[in-house]
Amino acid sequence: MAAKVQRLSLNEAIALVNDGDQVFTGGWTVVRRPMGLVYEIVRQKKKNLHLCANPGGPEVDLLIGAGCATVGEINYIGHEVFGHPYNFRRAVEKTQTPGYRHDDWTVQTGALRIMAGAMGLPFLPTLSLKGSDISLPGMDSLQDLRLQDPKLPRKKLAVIKDPFWEGQEVVLVPALRPDVCLLHVQEVGDKGTVRIQGGCFLDYYGAIASKLVIVSAEHIVPENQLRDNPERNSIPGLKVDIIVELPYGAHPTALFGYYDNDPWWFRDYLAASKHQETFVDWLSKWVLQPGNHEGYIEKLGTERLHALQADPVKGYNPHIRRRLDKLEEVGGR
Amino acid sequence: MSNYSRLEMMAIAGARLINDGEVILVGTGLPLVSTLLAKHSHAPETVILMEAGLYDSYPQALPFCVADARGVYRTPWIGTAVELMGQFLQNKLVDVGFLGGAQVDRYGNINSTVIGLYGQPDVRFEGSGGACDIAVMAKKTIIIMAHERKRFVERVDYLTSPGWMVRRYPDGKLIPRVEAGLWGGPYAVVSTLGVMKFRPQTHEMYVESFFADMGVTLEEIQQNTAFPIDVTQAKPLESPNDSELNVLRQVVDPEGIFMKY
């Protein structure tokens, strides 16, 4: 049976996420991340989340820093050229008993794992990982959890000889089977058809693989409007459960055709996230005290949002200057 | 004193290693700067791929990451990591992988994961991203990183991206790349001091050329390399020409995002 799409408020949508859920976040590093949904996860104080974005960006660093996540099966966590993921670093550096446990993967194997989940397969083969420490059982940081936690595969990977052709060694990587998929997109129809511009990344696979799919969008549009050009649509409504209208829902990450990365956000976040105390202050000021998404947008201010506006054709803002050491001030800070 | 920086010399040396028409899968940062410089000068038919799904990218402004709208704008086709990394790369359609990293050893093995012990690291980095996949499956790889003793190490603290001596599954013994069934392998390492390549038989790194016109000496390279490195065949690298510097400064990275003007 096709899912009956429900239109909910941000608060109602995130209330459906349970402590301990395995969560896939759409987008790619600092682009089109479901930041508004993630801020609400922090406000609702979700715990023990198991993250499987491949790769992760500020949304993953933020969930680790806020104490919402205990496990990650992820190939990269970072803010790209803006700076380092200090919350992630602090969670795993120089400690034998981290509150957050990190399992390293790669872009290709992360993609195959979520595709296996989407295909309903237990695993897929790859020629990658061979020769890397990532493949070694002795470097499996989740080994002690594997037989206890039903959300983790019993082994990180397996190696077999190809039974069909030349007989070379092939690595089998287990499916990801997320409980929840969080996406932010440009447009979603009122029956759940998703239209993404500027690259789908792994969002389609995340949606098909996950049990509960929550899509926030800049606009919820009449479904009929999306039927004119089906080839421009990215995800069918079949697997979309919840839709939420959330303008600027990817801020501070970039949304093709709508807004660019917010360099002022990254400057402030990077400075604050270097220490737990200053990060807690930042969270309080930017996520908790504003109370909801509208409060957050109001706090950013129109001048700041205006400075981020993308050229609708080019997809980015050709005038914005991105060097954090030479940023000029803008309102709303 | 030269009128260009070591960062610029490094970016230019990297660009010169790219041949016109090659299909090249690039990471963010210096690999992208070098590749765009090549594309804007001697290698206009280069096909630039990025792991997020970008095909034949030719950005008008420098992308901040491999998913940036700047890289997406006016591409002839766009896919996902399933096609780029699971199909193009694995099916040997990528001529060159261009990678950075935190540490490299004499066999071109790269670490972009941790400093110290993996289970209890002194410093944690962002992680492989697509680097391991690219190092395993590109037909050749070019590595670009600052030349410091703590980076050019005897043994990488964590072998993220396999070079010429790689981990055997499951015991982790170091074995020659070909014994692990891998094709490709590191072709060159471009640093802030020179360009290194690998001996055909032993696959050990040696210095092919160095930035003599910037005052770099072979002793300086040896002092900044924590393993013995052969410098006997090293030649001074040709200085950047005005055209290379102009394209780098005015077209590729006018903001100085990576070149730090």
Image (cartoon, coloured by chain):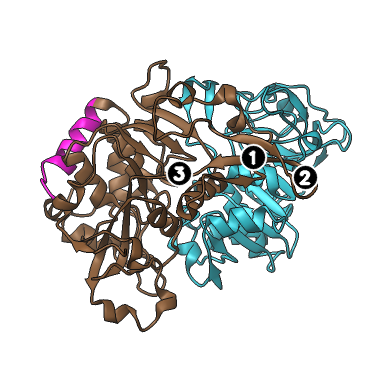
Chain colours: A brown, B cyan
Question: Looking at the image, is mark 3 or mark 1 earlier in the sequence?
Answer: 1
Q: Quadrant of the N terminus of chain B?
A: top right
Q: Amino acid at mark 3?
A: Leu
Whether residue B32 appears in this view of the structure is yes
Name the residue tied to disc 1.
A171
Foreground of the two, A16 or A106? A16
Foreground of the two, A148 or A115? A148
User: Which mark, residue A176?
Assistant: 3
Q: Amino acid at mark 2?
A: Trp
Q: Do the residues at discs 2 and 3 belong to one chain? A: no
> What residue lies at 45% left-to-right and 37% top-to-bottom?
A73
| Residue B159 image offset from top left, x and y in percent | 63, 29
Q: Secondary structure under badge 3?
A: loop
Say whether residue A235 is left or right of residue A106.
left
Name the residue tied to disc 2.
B183
Is A287 part of what is drawn in magenta?
yes
> Which subunit holds the residue at mark 3?
A
- Quadrant housing residue A309: bottom left
Q: Residues within 10 Å of mark 3 (few under 14, many from 20)?
A: many
**Measured Cα–Cα span from mark 2 to mark 3:** 28 Å
Is A279 part of what is drawn in magenta?
yes
Say whether residue B253 is left or right of residue B206.
left
**Measured Cα–Cα span from mark 3 to mark 1:** 16 Å
> Which subunit holds the residue at mark 1?
A
The magenta region covers A277-292
Q: Residues within 10 Å of mark 1 (few under 14, many from 20)?
A: many
Position above or below: B145 against A13: above
